[in-house]
Amino acid sequence: DHFYTIRMERAFSLALHLHSTVSSVLHCVSFYLLLQKTPPNQREVRSFLVFIQAILCIHDLSFDVLVHPMPLIPLPAAYFLEILARMDVPVNIMMSLIVDFGYLIAVSFVLCFIHKHQTIIGNTSKFKMSK
């Protein structure tokens, strides 16, 4: 009951492959909309959004294709199956890849919110940053 069966591993692997397929399609749609359909008044923030989308795309690719973690339920642990694991890349490198992309995503969101904040507040506000 507490063991991770082959059936559970296959189901989780299938879920990750489905996630990879769906997210790849959605990334393509997002890039198209950002690059081709962005309204003129949003062109300034588009670079932030394209950067965030690129990092999300690379994160999904690295998570689903390069690393492909399999959780060891009920333990807070996992083992890895895909390309990097087959190339004998150390686990700490694979984990740092996932964590680093998560960090980049968080920093990108913060920068986007700062940019939005700076464009909304008035020029005389004490919260306005100098260029």
Image: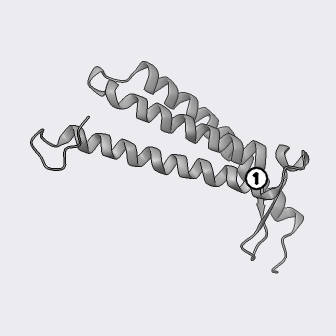
Q: Residue at x 35, y 32 (%)?
A: 45
Question: Which picture quadrant has residue 17?
Answer: top right
Q: Position of residue 11 (x, y in %)?
A: 78, 58
Q: Position of residue 110 (x, y in %)?
A: 39, 49
Residue 109 as seen in the image, left or right of residue 60: left
Name the quarter where the C terminus is drawn: top left
Query: In terms of depth relative to the viewer, which is nearer, 32 or 113?
Result: 113
Q: Is residue 34 above or below residue 116?
A: above
Q: Is residue 13 above or below residue 87?
A: below
- Mark 1 burial class by Cα count in 10 Å: few <14, some 14-19, many 20+: few
Q: Position of residue 120 (x, y in %)?
A: 19, 41
Q: Residue at x 72, y 46 (%)?
A: 64
Q: Position of residue 71 (x, y in %)?
A: 76, 65
Query: In terms of depth relative to the viewer, which is nearer, 97 or 38?
Result: 97
Query: In terms of depth relative to the viewer, which is nearer, 82 or 95?
Result: 95
Q: Amino acid at mark 1?
A: Ile
Q: Residue at x 61, y 50 (%)?
A: 100
Q: Label 1's element?
A: helix
As drawn, the residue found furthest toward the bottom would be 1
Residue 68 as seen in the image, left or right of residue 119: right
Q: Residue at x 84, y 43 (%)?
A: 83
Residue 40 as seen in the image, left or right of residue 56: left
As drawn, the residue found furthest toward the left would be 124
Query: In terms of depth relative to the viewer, which is nearer, 115 or 62?
Result: 115
Name the quarter where the N terminus is drawn: bottom right
The residue tagged 1 is 93
